[in-house]
Image: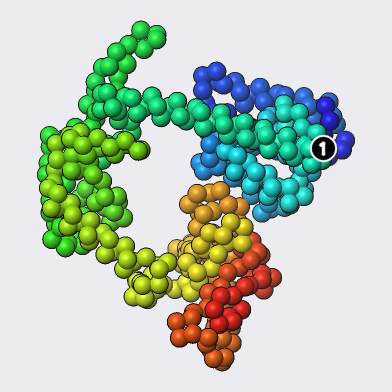
Amino acid sequence: MTHPFQEGDHVSAYLRDSGHEEQELSIPQQEKAVREFCAAEGLILVRIFKDESRPGSSAIGREAFQDMLAHFIRDKAPEAGLLLWSFARFARNDLDAQFHKAQLRRAGYEIHSLTDQVPEGLHGRLIEYVIDYSNALYLENLSKEVKRGLRELVEQYGGVPGTPPRGFRREKLEVGKRRDGQPHIVHRWVPRADDEWERCRLAWELRAKGATLAEIRRRTRLYKSNNSYHRFFRNRIYLGVLEFGPLTIPGYCEALISEETWNLVQDMNQRNTLTNNLADGQAANHPNRRRGSYLLSGLARCGLCGAAVNGNTVVRGGKREYKYYLCSRAKRRKDCASGRSPASGWSRLSSKACWNTSSSPPRSPNCKPKLWPCTPSRNTPEQANWTHCGNGAG
């Protein structure tokens, strides 16, 4: 088998299975094959990253995958490259596969699949893309079949997967027999018989009268966080309407509120969206802008993925505070390999840029400078490059 490595090269491996019964031994089998390959080809296996029972449809939630990306891209691993059992184990989403493989290759690392026969050169890149396309097509077809089956259960029996919203409970319903003879059970969402149903009604009535989310949370105790009420007040299930993907089922259950209450609350939601949306420039008095201690939070952009960079504070030993900027995508979705960057250095640079900008006449009275880091946030502020928007900051 041809491969891009030289005898004596150090390599790492990434292994994954989706947790299906037929794949119970998938990771041990992959690991055995990888070790045998390294022994036969004279390669030195340094590290193995394993994601057990993790789907390949997304990079989110795959801790070992994120560790592998950080190991190679952020920490600049000394290995020559990465071994895979197959490209399907790396990612089944074609965009994820192409993006993350390009990240590794642009950083100078080779990627080799033990089971996919891919020649070297441009023709090999084309064949590799066809493999990624086939993996994505398999995932799409599988997803369609699963969604079709779930949609039929919803349409015929009202069976809905997942956790019901506040005020509802799951009620078992037998809809036939499975192939193994066991009963096929689905669950309908039905109103609860306790006081939670009435607390939900109270929450809608308070919101329709203009109550704040903090006041509603204090009086109803439906959620621990104010943010959880945003989705609550947009769920049409409280009108008796079930929305399941593209499927809408009026009269699915008893309505908790009237159309009038629904419309009043949606009008308030719309007004709050326009007031608090930082992206549209209409939120000059938003608390994050008035009281925030991170000047660039929400304005700076990650040099790897382009997501917003937010400020974070860590307290160590209960005394000393460490402030830094971190890519919001790396923090929440964990599919960006950028690291933390000290806030103090960026503040000095941005203050200097704003000072220089203020000494020159602005192009427009509404033009405000916005700065983006163009290199990974792992770099120090003095090493990073800046571009500018507007009147020449940077």
Residue at 18%, 35% in the rendered image: 251
Residue at 50%, 69% in the rendered image: 299
Q: Is residue 1 above or below residue 57?
A: above
In percent of width and height, residue 271 lies at: 26, 64
Task: Give 118 or 91, whichever is nearer the viewer.
Answer: 118
On the rendered structure, is 365 left or right of 153?
right
Q: Is residue 237 above or below residue 337?
A: above
On the rendered structure, is 337 left or right of 298?
right
In percent of width and height, residue 194 lies at: 12, 37
Task: Give 98 or 288, whichever is nearer the viewer.
Answer: 98
On the rendered structure, is 25 left or right of 158?
right
Question: In this orientation, does residue 305 appear?
Answer: yes
On the rendered structure, is 323 left or right of 240?
right
In percent of width and height, residue 188 lies at: 24, 28
Quadrant (top left/top right/bottom left/bottom right) for the C terminus? bottom right
**Farthest residue in the right direction?**
7
Question: In this orientation, does residue 62 appear?
Answer: no
Crowding at dot 1, Cα within 10 Å, few <14 / some 14-19 / many 20+, comes out as: few
SS at badge 1? loop
In percent of width and height, residue 91 lies at: 60, 37
When asked about the image quadrant of residue 385, the answer is bottom right
Residue at 77%, 42% in the rendered image: 110
Q: Is residue 230 above or below residue 183?
A: below
Residue at 72%, 26% in the rendered image: 115
Q: Amino acid at mark 1?
A: Glu
Residue to which mark 1 is pinned: 120
